[in-house]
Image (spheres, helix red, strand yellow):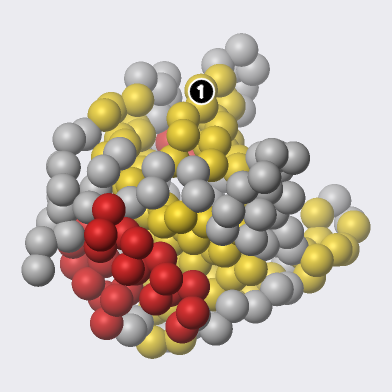
């Protein structure tokens, strides 16, 4: 089974970062099927999140999968992994054909509409080690993805994450850049994001 329709790679010109984007990493038929399967079969949960001392419902649903039993913590949330299912294992394997890495963990996010979001952050938790590789796959509605440099405030970038796309963040990216999925008041459908990581 070939999940690829186009392996064309776009390298983003980010100073102090290493980011590549594959806009059509999965063909439309496969992306449609994976979106619906993941939407229906994932044990989604909504946790309380604490930011700057305030606690509120996380503005999206999540689930964690892994193959080594390692939990993952961020913003005072600790998630314990489910075992990889066949769909996630297949997606992981395909990503690993273009990335020199073997991922152990996948954090899934479900953005139910435009009011679900993910604020400015870096994926720099200690479990991920130095210079982590983050492979981010998108299925469903397109969303805008923002970057901003941590020190050089005038350095900003954005791109649209397409249905079936893959975004790779490597090297010093998490040290130097923040990223977010902002809220939007525009009517927008559901989006599922899979972020594959390595937890040693």
Can residue 136 be seen here? no
Q: Residue furthest right?
A: 54
Q: Residue, x 53% and y 42% (percent of image)?
A: 143
In this view, 57 is above or below 161: below
**Does residue 60 appear to the left or right of 173 in the view shown?**
right
Q: Residue, x 21% and y 34% (percent of image)?
A: 9
| Residue 56, position as x, y percentages in the image | 85, 63
Asked which secondary structure carries label 1, the reply is strand
| Residue 129, position as x, y percentages in the image | 43, 57
Can residue 47 be seen here? yes
Residue behind mark 1:
157
Q: Quadrant of the N terminus?
A: bottom left
Q: Quadrant of residue 90?
A: bottom left
Q: Name the foreground residue: 159 vs 185.
A: 185
In this view, 180 is above or below 177: below
Q: Residue, x 64% and y 68% (percent of image)?
A: 61
- The number of callouts visible is 1
| Residue 87, position as x, y percentages in the image | 29, 76
| Residue 58, position as x, y percentages in the image | 74, 63
Q: Residue furthest left?
A: 1
Q: Quadrant of the C terminus?
A: bottom left
């Amino acid at each position: 089974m070939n999940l690829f329709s186009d392996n064309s790679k776009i390298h983003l010109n980010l100073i102090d970062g290493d980011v590549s984007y594959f806009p059509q990493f999965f063909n439309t038929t496969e992306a449609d099927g994976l979106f619906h399967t993941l939407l229906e079969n994932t044990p989604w949960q909504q946790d309380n999140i604490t930011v700057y001392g305030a606690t509120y419902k996380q503005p999206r649903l999540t689930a964690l999968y892994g193959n080594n039993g390692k939990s993952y913590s961020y913003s005072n949330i600790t998630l314990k992994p489910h075992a990889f299912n066949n769909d996630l294992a297949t997606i992981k394997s395909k990503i690993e054909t273009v990335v020199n890495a073997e991922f152990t963990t996948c954090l899934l996010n479900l953005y139910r509409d435009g009011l679900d979001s993910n604020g400015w952050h870096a994926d720099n938790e200690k479990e991920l080690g130095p210079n982590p590789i983050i492979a981010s796959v998108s299925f469903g509605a397109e969303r805008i993805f923002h970057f901003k440099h941590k020190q050089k405030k005038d350095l900003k970038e954005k791109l649209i994450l397409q249905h079936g796309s893959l975004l790779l963040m490597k090297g010093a990216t998490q040290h130097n850049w923040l990223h977010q999925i902002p809220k939007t008041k525009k009517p927008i459908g559901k989006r599922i994001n899979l972020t594959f990581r390595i937890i040693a």
